[in-house]
Image (cartoon, rainbow, N blue to C red):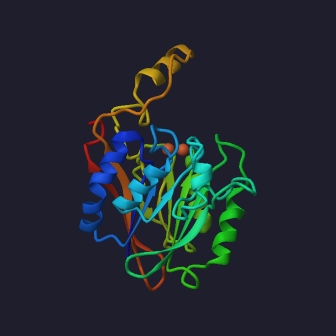
Amino acid sequence: MRILFIGDVVGRSGRSAVCERLPALRERLGTHFVIVNGENAAGGFGITEQIFIELTDAGADVVTTGNHVWDQREALVFIGRQDRLLRPLNYPPGTPGRGAGIFRASNGADVLVINAMGRIFMEALDDPFPAIEKEIGACPLKQAADAIFIDFHAEATSEKQAVAMNFDGRVTAVIGTHTHVPTADARVLAKGTAYMTDAGMSGDYNSVIGMEKAEPLQRFLTKIPSGRFMPALGPATICGALIEVDMDTGLARSIVPIREGAPLGG
Ligand SMILES: [Fe+2]
Ligand SMILES: [Fe+2]
């Protein structure tokens, strides 16, 4: 089975690229299941229900998020009726929506998708390690799920690697998101879990992590904000990874980075 993961969709540029290209990409790569991180899909900040529907219509089976999940306030409400939208697992008890779910792939396999968030240089959430442990304890690989995919949304490489190492051999893949630049370390770990520190974003790379350059530069150079962050609108590169799953073990046979659309930097 093949699982395609697509990193943080940023703004209109990223959204149009994913919506236009995902149906053909899904076909060409022989993909059975697609997960898209949509936390920056609405103007760079959060996701609306309409955009969520556009992404699922284009072929996303599940949309994951991260620290920007509530930037569009409507997400607090529509997450309750759209069970293919996940928010990080380790938000406080009582947070709307859910951080994990089992979904059916096109080949009939059951895929447990977990969205969790790191705590280093991020908000002080609950500890992601026991939160993930609880989910995979309730739904172990090859007993209750044919594959287990973790989108670990975090700033620090060390924390991402630690999650991957801790769950190596017990989940199919741990892929990082949030830093918006693809890392060159896609590999299958010693016990069979596919790993990539960051999938990269799907957006315009002629930017500062997806945002029009002027405002981030202004803030770095002068420390004085002069406006809002706006997503860069040039041609997008879709970044992600394709994981081949061994159906006997539920572990990964291979992982290859995916880059589609404009070359990085337009
Ligand atoms: Fe992001
Ligand atoms: Fe993020």
* Residue 198 visible in the current orientation: no
The correct choice, above or below, for 233 with respect to 180 in the image is above
In percent of width and height, residue 115 lies at: 57, 59
- Residue for point 33% across, 70% down: 31
- Residue for point 34% across, 38% down: 204
* Residue 30 visible in the current orientation: yes
In percent of width and height, residue 75 lies at: 57, 49
- Residue for point 55% across, 64% down: 83
Nearer the observer, 260 or 95: 95
Left or right placement of residue 112 versus residue 252 in this view: right
The correct choice, above or below, for 183 with respect to 128 in the image is above
In percent of width and height, residue 28 lies at: 24, 66
Residue 208 found in image quarter: top left
Nearer the observer, 172 or 266: 266
The correct choice, above or below, for 18 with respect to 256 in the image is above
Question: How many marks do you count on the picture?
Answer: 0
Instruction: In the displayed orientation, state which residue is furthest to the right.
Output: 93
Left or right placement of residue 244 versus residue 49 in this view: left
Q: Quadrant of the C terminus?
A: top left
Nearer the observer, 117 or 252: 117
In percent of width and height, residue 38 lies at: 47, 50
The correct choice, above or below, for 220 with respect to 169 in the image is above
Q: Quadrant of the N terminus?
A: bottom left
- Residue for point 45% across, 86% down: 248
